Image: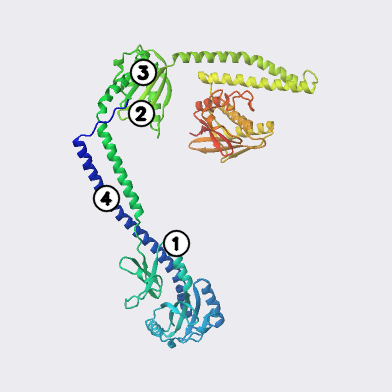
């Protein structure tokens, strides 16, 4: 039955009221700071957008102006002497370089005598600048100051509106020659400016500055944008001084409204939880009895499990030990506390090194080690140790200790039985295989087709049984440590060439061997390496798709030689990968599986490679499998 919460007393209510007021003040302060931050952020974004528009305008508008300056330099170098045909070619090239140029006019002696292109600009021919009363004062000032001038927007003589960039040309002897004028279409420039501003979500306006520092009315955008609150930037255009104004972006209130609702909702939740906490404090007293009962129950379980369990601090001293620990090692429970836990081991140094290597990993997990335990009477025994790092600050690790003496004895009996049966089977199988080989070879006279087929089936099964016996014997020798190894340097490349040629001939399959060096000297047992390589190649042949090549790669790195065997097929199922190198493990264990095998080949290969200080593993490929072995270089 749920216990009802007690009512709040006076001081608790007062505390909640004070906290409510403090939270309201804090929320409003946070909102004010957020509003200031949003305003500053909006101004930064507005400045960045305006700078992009200004940069794009400066780039596109200055291109024809620079082209005009380059034309003036060219005319100066030619002393103002150009033929009409040469001038048409030159001006056509300049006009093509900028889509904003409407025409370029050449006015020696202030009279326009040549315009390109002429079509649509015929009215500009023979225009004499002093005949323009509204423009001539500015043009005369430009000539006297020898500075180019960008005028506009203007109503053009040839029709329409645009900018005119006039460049006074003086020859090398200092004499005045005339004016080069470039007319820039207004519409595409305004379209560029409009699209850029719309793309960046801002509103802009442009106005000019006179040489006296006075401002002109806005010739693009709204005049109202030029106000003290708007952002104003100078625009760097040759021959003119412009200002750009950007409309002030309002700070959106929806974000502040959502933030206000969120903060007040959070504050209400905190106050509610605090009231619940204050009302539930008294429950702690009632929970102590339940906690004590739970601790006693866990202690009973801890002391009655069959495995020994100890917790060890950072210095390696035993902090707790259950009753099973005392039973396994023959010590009293109190005698184990504060002792170095390694005194329970006969091979303590080796075990400590293995645990230390695991603890140096980024994410250490539970580790299982077989080692030698040491009882109080000095007797050693087989021990299985489970080591688990603990995240708590006080404890360093948890150790579970299991006496596996009986299990090891049973495993030894099993191994002895397998070895005995295998030895007893080898001799009759050899005789049967020999007799079947003679019969298949014709020693018993001509055979019918059906007889030949039946004998070949018997011979193949006899060979498989013989291979199973050999695998069992090898595995028994590896398990008992009685398999001899001749570790000598030899070249791995010729061995692989011989095996691939042999299998390619007998199996009618294609092998591709690639190597990045001429020799691959390794330090290993050549016969056993041959056995491992033959097993990997045979597996690749079994599980690769028909008519697909088996690829072998040889490479050297990190003082090791690596062999990669790739095949194109279904690959190893992901769920089976952790069991690949276990004995009798096969991905398809059904009696009707497509490929035959004992399930010992990879387990034997792994133990052989481990004993030769190498490494063997598997990698999943996009369209198949890769098994690899690494062996130490002979030079290392």
Q: Position of residue 15 (x, y in %)?
A: 21, 39
Pointer 1 or 3: first along the chain: 1
Pointer 2 or 3: first along the chain: 3
Tag 2, which secondary structure?
loop
Tell me the residue that label 1 is attached to: 199
Pointer 4 or 3: first along the chain: 4
Q: Position of residue 574 (x, y in %)?
A: 54, 32
- Dot 2 crowding, Cα within 10 Å, few <14, some 14–19, many 20+: some
- Dot 4 crowding, Cα within 10 Å, few <14, some 14–19, many 20+: some
Lateral position of residue 47 relative to residue 114, left or right: left
Residue 47 appears in which quarter of the rendering?
bottom left
Quarter of the picture holding the N terminus: top left
Tag 1, which secondary structure?
helix
Tell me the residue that label 3 is attached to: 301
- Dot 3 crowding, Cα within 10 Å, few <14, some 14–19, many 20+: few
Mark 1 to mark 3 CA distance (whole Å): 71 Å
Q: Which numbered disc covers residue 390? A: 2
Foreground mark, 1 or 4? 4
Q: Is residue 330 above or below residue 598?
A: above
Residue at image point 56% right, 21% down: 474
């Amino acid at each position: 039955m749920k216990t009802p919460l007690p009512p709040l007393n006076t001081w608790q209510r007062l505390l909640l009221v004070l906290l409510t007021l403090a939270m309201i003040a804090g929320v409003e302060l946070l909102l004010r700071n957020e509003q200031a931050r949003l305003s500053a952020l909006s101004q930064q974004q507005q400045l960045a957008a305006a700078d992009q528009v200004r940069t794009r305008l400066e780039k596109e508008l200055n291109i024809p102006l620079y082209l005009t300056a380059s034309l003036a330099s060219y005319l100066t170098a030619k002393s103002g002497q150009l033929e009409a045909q040469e001038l048409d070619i030159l001006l056509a090239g300049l006009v093509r370089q900028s889509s904003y140029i409407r025409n370029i006019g050449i006015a020696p002696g202030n009279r326009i005598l040549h315009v390109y292109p002429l079509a649509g600009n015929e009215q500009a021919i023979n225009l004499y600048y002093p005949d323009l009363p509204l423009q001539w004062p500015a043009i005369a000032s430009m000539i006297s100051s020898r500075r180019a001038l960008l005028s506009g927007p203007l109503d053009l003589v040839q029709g329409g509106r645009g900018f005119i960039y006039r460049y006074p040309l003086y020859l090398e002897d200092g004499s005045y020659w005339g004016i080069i004028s470039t007319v820039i279409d207004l519409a595409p420039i305004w379209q560029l400016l409009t699209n850029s501003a719309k793309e960046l979500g801002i509103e802009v306006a442009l106005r000019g500055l006179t040489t006296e520092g006075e401002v002109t009315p806005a010739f693009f955008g709204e005049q109202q944008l030029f106000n003290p609150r708007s952002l104003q930037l100078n625009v760097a255009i040759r021959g003119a001084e412009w200002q750009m104004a950007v409309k002030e972006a309002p700070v959106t209130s929806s974000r502040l409204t959502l933030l206000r609702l969120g903060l007040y909702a959070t504050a209400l939740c905190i106050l509610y939880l605090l009231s619940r906490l204050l009302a539930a404090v008294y429950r702690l007293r009632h929970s102590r009895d339940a906690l004590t009962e739970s601790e006693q129950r866990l202690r009973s379980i801890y002391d009655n499990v069959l495995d020994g369990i100890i917790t060890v601090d950072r210095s390696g001293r035993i902090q707790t030990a259950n009753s099973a620990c005392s039973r396994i090692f023959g010590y009293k429970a109190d005698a184990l506390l504060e002792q170095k836990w390694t005194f329970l081991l006969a091979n303590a140094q080796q075990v400590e090194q293995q645990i230390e290597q695991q603890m140096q990993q980024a994410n250490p997990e539970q580790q299982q080690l077989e080692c030698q335990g040491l009882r109080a009477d000095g007797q050693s025994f087989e021990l299985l140790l489970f080591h688990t790092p603990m995240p708590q600050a006080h404890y360093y690790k948890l150790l579970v200790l299991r006496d596996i003496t009986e299990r090891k004895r049973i495993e030894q009996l099993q191994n002895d039985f397998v070895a005995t049966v295998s030895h007893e089977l080898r001799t009759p199988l050899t005789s049967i295989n020999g007799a079947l080989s003679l019969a298949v070879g014709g020693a018993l006279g001509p055979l019918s087709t059906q007889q030949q087929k039946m004998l070949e089936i018997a011979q193949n099964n006899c060979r498989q049984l013989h291979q199973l016996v050999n695998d069992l014997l090898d595995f028994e020798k590896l398990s008992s440590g009685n398999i001899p190894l001749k570790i000598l340097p030899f070249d791995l490349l010729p061995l692989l060439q011989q095996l691939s040629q042999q299998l390619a001939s007998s199996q009618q399959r294609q092998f591709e061997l690639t190597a990045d060096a001429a020799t691959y000297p390794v330090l290993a047992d050549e016969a056993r390496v041959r056995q491992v390589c033959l097993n990997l190649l045979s597996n690749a042949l079994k599980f690769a798709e028909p008519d697909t090549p088996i690829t072998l790669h040889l490479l050297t790195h990190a003082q090791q030689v690596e062999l990669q065997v790739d095949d194109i097929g279904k690959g190893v199922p992901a769920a089976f990968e952790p069991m690949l190198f276990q004995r009798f493990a096969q991905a398809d264990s059904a009696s009707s599986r497509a490929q035959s095998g004992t399930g010992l080949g990879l387990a034997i290969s792994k133990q052989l490679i481990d004993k030769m200080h190498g490494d063997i593993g598997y990698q999943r490929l996009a369209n198949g499998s890769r098994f690899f072995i690494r062996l130490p270089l002979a030079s290392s």
